[in-house]
Amino acid sequence: MRAIVCLVTIAVLAFLPSLASAQRGMAIDYFATAEDPSETMAMLFTRVTTRAEYDGPAITLRSSLYVPGAVAMSKVQVTGGGLLGATREEYDHYILYNPRIMALADRAGFKTIAQMAILAREIGHHLHCETNTRYPSNAIRHSARTFDPAADEYVGFVLARVNASISEAVEAQRFLLVLAGRPEAESIEQRIDAVVDGWERGQGPDPETLRARLTHRLENDSQSIQSWW
C-alpha cells in the first residue's frame, strides 16, 4: 500500500505545472509548450507502431510537463477546398507524454512495458478517431480515468505484439489505473478484461483455450486492484 501511495503522490507532483497554470487562470497552449521526445521514447514509439502494424493517421510524439501521463490530441487545420468553396477541417495528430511519469514507470520496475502501454493507449485513441476536436483540453478531461474499451483493448494487443507476457500486460494496466488516480470502480474489472482481450488478439488463434487458463489468475488480479482503493 505504501508503494501505491508513493506512486500516486509522485504522479500528482508531475502534473503540478498544469495545475498551477490552471489556478492562475492561464490557458495552456499544449502544442507550443511541447518539446521533442527523448531518444528512448522515440524508439519505443517506433517499436510499438511497427510491431502492431499501426495503419492509422500519422502521429507526432512530443514531450510535455503539462499533461498527466500521456494524452492523444489533434490540432485542427482549417483549409479550403470543401464543397462549394466551404472550409473544411483537417487534423494533425499528436501524443504528448509527461517525461516525469515515464521516468516513474521506469523506476517502478516496469522497464519499458508500462511506457509502451501508456503510448499504446493514446495510439488507440487516434486509431479510433476519438481525438478530432477543436478543443485539446477535452483530451485532458478524458484521460486514463475514463473507461475506453477500444483503447484498453489496444494496449493488450500492442503488448502481445512486443512479446510481453499476460502477467506483464496486467501489471502494466494496473500501473495505468494507479496513474488515473481513481478510475470508476465499476470499470476496473472491465478494463483488465479489455487488456486481456487485446492480448489474446495479439497472440493469434485459439483465444478460448487461453482464456480458460487465465480465468483464475485474472479474478485474483481484479480483487487485488480493487483492494488498493
Image: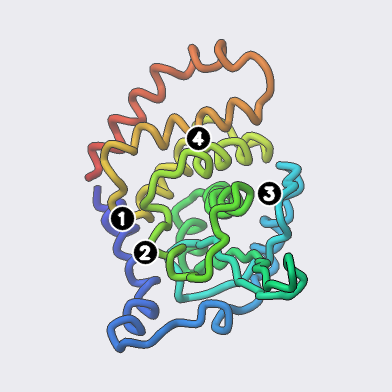
Mark 1 vs mark 2, foreground winner is 1
Q: Residue at coordinates 58% horizontally, 40% vertically from top-left?
A: 154
Q: Are marks 1 and 2 in contact (CB under 8 Å)?
A: yes
Secondary structure category for the residue under label 1:
loop
Q: Residue at coordinates 55% horizontally, 54% vertically from top-left?
A: 122
Q: Which residue is mark 3?
A: 48
Dot 2 or dot 4: first in sequence order is 2
Secondary structure category for the residue under label 2:
helix
Secondary structure category for the residue under label 4:
helix
- What x and y, as percent, mark residue 215? 42, 17
Name the one closer to the observer, 54 or 104: 54
Mark 1 burial class by Cα count in 10 Å: few <14, some 14-19, many 20+: some
What's the CA distance linking mark 3 and mark 1? 25 Å
Q: Residue at coordinates 68% horizontally, 37% vertically from top-left?
A: 161
Dot 1 or dot 2: first in sequence order is 2
Q: Amino acid at mark 4?
A: Val
Q: Which residue is mark 2?
A: 11
What's the CA distance linking mark 2 and mark 4? 22 Å
